[in-house]
Image (cartoon, rainbow, N blue to C red):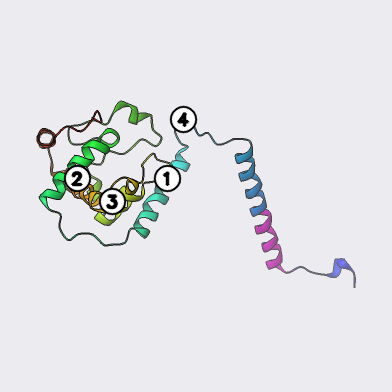
Amino acid sequence: MKLADVTIPAFAWAIAGWLAGLGTLGAVGLAVLVFGLFDVRASTPDNPLFAWATHTTMIHATQRRAGSSAPARFTAAQVQAGFADYDRLCVSCHGGPGVDRQRWASGMEPTPPYLLDAARNWTPAQLKMIIGDGVRMTGMPAWRTALSNAQQWDIVAFVEAMPYLSAGDYQKLRAASPPDSDCH
């Protein structure tokens, strides 16, 4: 029997092809790491395909992991408390009704989204997860390290109420809240 007479099954060629492809992908990934080929500057907009892939992954991961536990209703006191924390910690990046985010936030990549309609796109449990755990590669911190569970839910309460607030309503809430610092 000669080696030329031996046939290799098609599945063996498929496995060899997959292994070669994975090896090539690994080598390219290693080259990107070792030679610094990935542009990490926040001043450079993301490639549209990369931006779509990371944003889509964030949406699906949040939907999958957030669960469904949330308070049945939020109280006016929770909305007021959530406003105070939102205005102190979040408005600089995300803005509010009639309030622009700080100019420096536009230098972040990706640019932080305005949250005026976030409650229409995310469930309360999903908002709580985003607030508490943050979002990688976006500048969104994990507030669970600085805020209690109740404070995180208060911010969710405010974000849920935000679509119903006018710019004047937001300013009235600001006037009713004691000033905290130079955050806004």
Residue type at the position of mark 2: Gly
Residue at the extreme top: 103
Instruction: Compute the Cα span from label 1 to label 2.
Output: 23 Å
Say which mark, if any, is on residue 82: 2
Instruction: Compute the Cα span from label 1 to label 3.
Output: 15 Å
Q: Nearer the viewer, mark 4 or mark 3?
A: 3
Where is residue 172? Give x, y as percent.
9, 35
Residue at the spot of label 4: 44
Instruction: Compute the Cα span from label 2 to label 3.
Output: 13 Å
* Front residue (pair 25, 31): 31
Residue at the spot of label 3: 127
Point out the tag, 1 or 2, that comes first from the N-terminus.
2
Point out the tag, 1 or 3, that comes first from the N-terminus.
3
Where is residue 173? Give x, y as percent.
12, 37
Q: Magenta stretch: give its range.
A: 9-21
Point out the tag, 4 or 2, that comes first from the N-terminus.
4
**Which structural element holds mark 1?**
loop
**Which structural element holds mark 2?**
helix
